[in-house]
Amino acid sequence: EIEKIERIYKSYKEVISTLSKEKGWISPHLCQYQGFWFDPTYNLAGVMFIQQHFKPRPTDVLLISSPKSGTTWLKAIAFAIMKRTSYNSMSVVHPLLTTNPHDCVPFLEILLRTPPIADVEDLPSPRLFSSHIPYTLLSESIQNSGCRIVYVCRNPKDVFTSMWHFTTKLKTNNLPCSSLSLEEAFDMFCEGISSYGPFWDHVLGYWKASLACPESVLFLNYEDMRRDTPIHVKKLAEFLGQPFSLEEESKGIVQGIVELCSFENLSNLEVNKNGTLHYGIKGDVFFRKGQIGDWKNHLTAQMTERLDQITKEKLGGLF
Ligand code: A3P
């Protein structure tokens, strides 16, 4: 079995070596695979393995996003909702108080990045994973499995701004980040050359899927969630088949989850300020400002116009 897995990953390496490459934001290169750009060091082999070998269960929950769209927050909220019978959100021993959301909800690509891979078959149901994999790359077996997919999207101007800061922050984590200037990174983002980009195609894939199969794909938006978090916590719980009872609501459980998972609370916890994730990077890179509209402090009028134009062309009235 181990040898078989190693052979699979060796064949991925061969495929990856033939793909077209561009300068990367974090690793030296991004590779184009099936219409999207991937980091060959950190996630492409994992994406290929998910595509070809991941066995979905109807009870699985997949939290999916384009990077920097609110993944960390969604992970915390979904985890708190699904575990609420074991851990009261107001409890002083809640796992989210001592564990980074990325260690509470594992990234499939990272679990499956390189052998020896994690045995996801051994995990009890319902399994909760996250991924950045584009919709069109999901195998039919996943698309038709009945598993629930929650997608979060965010305004591309804030996504770019967040991604740019994330890349520069990773440098202090001793990762081999390339020396892209803000302008260079911006051009690449607009051309679709960013991790799991083009951003707009990523969003569109899940947007269409949520319209076609609303019972299996829930499409959320960071800005809406920020404006009215309790409504979205309730909506998510309903979608996950675990709606809040009136008793829970009257006990303040929804509000407890909102507060537990808030940027202010999570970003000030010791584990998220100084802790390190199980795969080695510092957990604080996932918390910066958590605001809507920080792009105004970083993008010129010309940049704004260019990004807005692309978004209008590709996504119409979605933002
Ligand atoms: P900013 O860089 O704009 O602050 P991801 O989790 O997909 O990597 O996205 C990271 C972005 O989400 C960062 O945005 C980060 O600050 C923000 N974020 C992290 N935790 C959050 C939370 N609990 N509530 C709201 N935003 C959060």
Image (cartoon, helix red, strand yellow):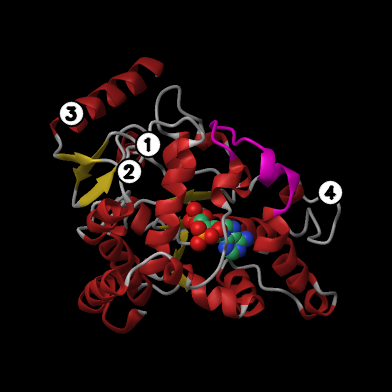
Q: Nearer the viewer, residue 148 or 204?
A: 204
Q: Nearer the viewer, residue 182 or 278?
A: 182
Q: Secondary structure at mark 4?
A: loop
- Compute the Cα span from label 4 to label 2: 38 Å
Is residue 185 shown left or right of residue 152? left
The tag earlier along the polypeptide, 1 or 4, is 4
Is residue 269 shown left or right of residue 306? right
Identify the residue at image location x=53%, y=32%: 279
The tag earlier along the polypeptide, 4 or 2, is 2
The tag earlier along the polypeptide, 1 or 2, is 2
Is the Cβ of the residue at disc 1 closer than 8 Å to that at disc 4? Answer: no
The mark closer to the camera, 4 or 2, is: 2
Where does the magenta region start and end?
268-282
| Displayed quadrant of residue 178 | top left
Determine which residue is flagged by label 2: 25
The mark closer to the camera, 1 or 4, is: 1
Determine which residue is flagged by label 3: 17
The label on residue 93 is 4
Identify the residue at image location x=51%, y=34%: 173
Q: Secondary structure at mark 3?
A: helix
Q: Amino acid at mark 4?
A: Val
Is the Cβ of the residue at disc 1 closer than 8 Å to that at disc 2? Answer: yes
- In the rendered image, residue 91 lying in the magenta stretch gets the answer no
- Compute the Cα span from label 1 to label 2: 6 Å
- Compute the Cα span from label 4 to label 3: 47 Å
User: Measured from the top left, where is residue 155 in percent x and y?
Assistant: 40, 71
| Quadrant in which ligand 1 is drawn | bottom right
